[in-house]
Structures are given as structure tokens and as C-alpha cells.
Image (cartoon, rainbow, N blue to C red):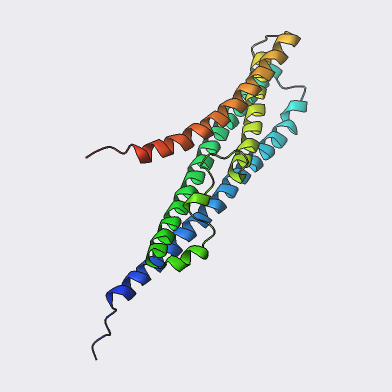
């Protein structure tokens, strides 16, 4: 017997439902990845710092100048990893935001077809939070990474000064604190820049 053909309205509804479920899963995956990325960086920093300070730093036979240069390099690498983590958090925030926009577009389409559905949807375009929101979970995770990155950059500067034999207590700490603040502010700037750059790319797509 010939297979029963799906009517055009039914096929359209099936496509919309499948698209809605796919976008919802994408938004959920972006949130899960965001938490995983931040946790990975926190664990990586904590594990490496614990490993470093529990081994050679208390070995008096080790050349402390060489060890300081090594520490400086490792902390600088951790700072770079923090920057990459912040970029990933910004991209995942943007991905989640785009998914919400796509879901709301389907909602608006459904409302246009049936005005009574307007009362069923609390979350719509007009109620969406801004992409860059300082009290969002994404921003708070970025704050955690930025604080650690600032500390690692300050530590990199401190150990570098010790490694090259620059001993000036007030200057050492001044450069260290300044470096930590610079690292912290830079990470927050990178996060905001990548979010706004994502919006700019969407609004100013190249003309073919």
C-alpha cells in the first residue's frame, strides 16, 4: 500500500517542533559547556599551583633564580589559558543568546498564527536579558577566571623579577599588584569585547 503522505500544514508543524527542540538542546548544551569550561580552568590552576609549591620550591639545593624564571613562565601560561577561557565563555554566552533569539522567533511566528498563544509565553523578545549583563551567571564565571588570571599574571611578574635578580621590596610588590590588576581588568575587557564583536558581526555581515 502506498505510504500516507503528510499534508503541508502537518509537515510545517513537524519541522517547527523539530527546529524548536534542536535550538532548545543547543541552548542547554551551551550552558553545560560554559560551566565545564570555567570549572576546568579553576581545577587546572589549583592543581598546577599545588603541584608547584609542594615540590621543588622547598628544595634548597635547587637554583632559586632558575626556579623563579620557570615559575614565571608557568604562571604566564596560566594567564594565557585564562584569556582563552574568557573568550570561550564569551562565545558560549553569545551562542546561548542566539539560541534564545531563535526560540523567540519561533514563538513570535506561532503567536502571529494564533494570538491566544501570547498569554502562554512569558519569555519573549521584549523580556530577554541583554547580551552583556554584569549580574549574569556567565559574567560571574568570567569574574572568577579573571581574578585567577590576574593573580597568575601578578605571580608571573613577581617571580620574573626575582629570577632576573631585581630586588626592591616596594618596587617588586608595586609591579606585582599592578600586574595583577592589569590582568584582571584585561580579562573583563576581553570578555566584553568579544560579546560586542559578536553582535557587530551579525549586524554588519559582508555583502556578497
Where is residue 179? Give x, y as percent: 63, 20
- When the figure is inspected, residue 23 is found, relative to residue 132, above or below; the finding is below
Q: Indicate the position of residue 2 as horizontal and vertical percent values.
A: 23, 88
> Front-most of 72 and 110?
110
Q: Seen in the image, is 3 located left or right of residue 150?
A: left
Q: Quadrant of residue 104?
A: bottom left
State the residue at coordinates (51%, 62%). 121
Q: Residue 198 sits in which quadrant?
A: top left
The N terminus appears in which quarter of the rendering? Answer: bottom left
Q: How many marks?
A: 0
The vertical placement of 135 against 6, above or below, is: above
Q: Is residue 31 visible?
A: yes
Write the residue at 33% across / 75% down. Answer: 10
Q: Is residue 207 above or below residue 172?
A: below
Residue 17 locus on image (x, y percent): 41, 68
Question: In this image, 45 relative to 24: left or right?
Answer: right
Farthest front residue? 115
Q: Is residue 66 visible?
A: no
Q: Please identify the quadrant where the C terminus is shown.
A: top left
Q: Is residue 160 left or right of residue 92?
A: right
Q: Nearer the viewer, residue 24 or 118?
A: 118
Image point (67%, 24%), residue name: 155
Amino acid at each position: 500500500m502506498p505510504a500516507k503522505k503528510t499534508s503541508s500544514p502537518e509537515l510545517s508543524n513537524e519541522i517547527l517542533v523539530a527546529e524548536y527542540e534542536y535550538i532548545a538542546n543547543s541552548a542547554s548544551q551551551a550552558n553545560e559547556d560554559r560551566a565545564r569550561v570555567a570549572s576546568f580552568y579553576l581545577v587546572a590552576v589549583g592543581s598546577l599551583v599545588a603541584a608547584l609549591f609542594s615540590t621543588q620550591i622547598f628544595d634548597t639545593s635547587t637554583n632559586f633564580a632558575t626556579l623563579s624564571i620557570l615559575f614565571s613562565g608557568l604562571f604566564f601560561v596560566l594567564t594565557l589559558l585564562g584569556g582563552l577561557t574568557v573568550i570561550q565563555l564569551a562565545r558560549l554566552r553569545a551562542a546561548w543568546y542566539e539560541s534564545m533569539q531563535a526560540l523567540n522567533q519561533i514563538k513570535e511566528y506561532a503567536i502571529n498564527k494564533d494570538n491566544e498563544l501570547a498569554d502562554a509565553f512569558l519569555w519573549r523578545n521584549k523580556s530577554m536579558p541583554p547580551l552583556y549583563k554584569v549580574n549574569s551567571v556567565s559574567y560571574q564565571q568570567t569574574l572568577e577566571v579573571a581574578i585567577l588570571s590576574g593573580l597568575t599574571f601578578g605571580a608571573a611578574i613577581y617571580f620574573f623579577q626575582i629570577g632576573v635578580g631585581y630586588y626592591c621590596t616596594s618596587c617588586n610588590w608595586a609591579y606585582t599588584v599592578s600586574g595583577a590588576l592589569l590582568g584582571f581588568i584585561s580579562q573583563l575587557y576581553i570578555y566584553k569585547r568579544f560579546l560586542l564583536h559578536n553582535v557587530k558581526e551579525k549586524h554588519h555581515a559582508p555583502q556578497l
